[in-house]
Image (cartoon, rainbow, N blue to C red):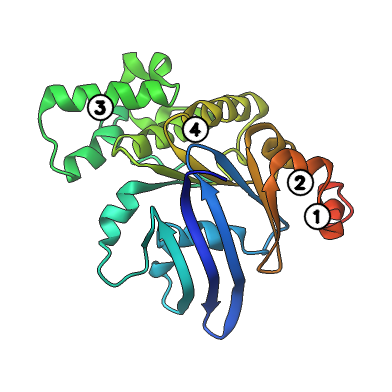
């Protein structure tokens, strides 16, 4: 795989004395969609949250091994976590817009980063909403509450909010699991478009979704990375019987 964006090596993660991730080594390529699949509790969301140090917010977490972003270890003591999270954005399972206007949801991040020029903010808001495929639905209601949007629109707004601070990587934790099929389809189309400019890592329980939108798939089970390969290979001719059993619905 060329142009590796994220490289993890011999990574272990513990919650207190319980090992949640066991010796994970993986290369995630730039400008591709990498899907993390596996049954509930297998470690895929824990792994995802390690990539922008969201697990730092949990007291008992201990991480060993290396996670390199563009060759730099993100757990190095000199790393500024705020700028890391600007570079590595996150979209959660449940859309979580602020109880502010649509405009203010998008402008919030750039403002925190020191951008206060009105016309510059206007441009960022429009560009972010366009790139998240929600501009046409939102442009006439920019000053209305974001909470008035539908669930699918709120999720695209949250993606726009992530894009507004110019990340390089977007982590998505089951971004469509709470949405209806039409909204899910819009999010999937959006993810495929976004990989032109961003590296995307997505946790999904939806096997068909992973098959439709991802370039590479990693199968996790009980905290271990069982198999990682091009999505087509994982779905048509996996190397491990465990992967085949999970993909074909024999367990999980």
Q: Earlier in the sequence, mark 4 or mark 3?
A: 3
- Measure the C-alpha gap from mark 3 to mark 1: 42 Å
Label 3 element class:
helix
Between disc 4 and disc 3, the foreground one is: 4
Q: Position of residue 13 (x, y in %)?
A: 53, 74
Q: Residue at x 14, y 21 (%)?
A: 119
* Residue 243 circle label: 1
Q: Which residue is mark 2?
A: 234
Q: Earlier in the sequence, mark 4 or mark 2?
A: 4
- Measure the C-alpha gap from mark 3 to mark 2: 39 Å
User: Is the C-beta separation of discs 3 and 2 under 8 Å?
Assistant: no
Whether 39 is drawn above or below 185: the answer is: below
User: Is the C-beta separation of discs 3 and 1 under 8 Å?
Assistant: no
Q: Earlier in the sequence, mark 3 or mark 2?
A: 3
Q: Residue at x 58, y 64 (%)?
A: 25
Q: Earlier in the sequence, mark 2 or mark 1?
A: 2
Q: Which residue extends farthest right?
A: 250
Residue 144 visible here: no
* Residue 124 circle label: 3
Q: Nearer the viewer, residue 164 or 198?
A: 198
In this picture, residue 68 sits left or right of residue 218: left
Whether 87 is drawn above or below 158: the answer is: below
Q: Residue at x 20, y 23 (%)?
A: 122
């Amino acid at each position: 795989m060329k142009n590796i964006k994220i490289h993890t090596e011999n990574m272990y993660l513990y919650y207190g004395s319980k090992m949640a991730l066991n010796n994970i080594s993986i290369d995630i390529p730039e400008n591709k969609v990498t899907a993390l699949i596996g049954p509930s509790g297998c470690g895929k969301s824990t792994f995802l949250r390690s990539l922008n140090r969201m697990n730092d917010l949990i007291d008992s977490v201990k991480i060993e091994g290396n996670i390199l972003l563009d060759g730099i270890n993100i757990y190095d003591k000199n790393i500024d976590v705020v700028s890391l999270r600007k570079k590595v954005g996150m979209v959660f399972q449940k859309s979580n817009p602020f109880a502010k206007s649509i405009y203010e949801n998008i402008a919030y991040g750039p403002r925190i980063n020191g951008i206060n020029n009105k016309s510059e903010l206007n441009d960022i808001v429009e560009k972010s909403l366009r790139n998240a495929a929600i501009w046409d639905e939102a442009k006439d209601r920019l000053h209305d509450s974001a909470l008035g949007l539908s669930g699918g629109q709120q999720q695209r707004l949250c993606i726009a909010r992530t894009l507004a601070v110019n990340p390089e990587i977007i982590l998505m934790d089951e971004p469509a699991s709470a949405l209806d099929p039409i909204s899910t389809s819009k999010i999937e189309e959006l993810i495929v478009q976004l990989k032109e400019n961003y590296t995307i890592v997505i946790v999904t329980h939806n096997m068909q979704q992973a098959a439709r939108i991802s370039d590479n798939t990693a199968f996790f089970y009980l905290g271990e990375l069982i198999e990682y390969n091009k999505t087509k290979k994982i779905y048509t001719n996996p190397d491990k019987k465990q992967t085949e059993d999970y993909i074909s619905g024999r367990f999980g």
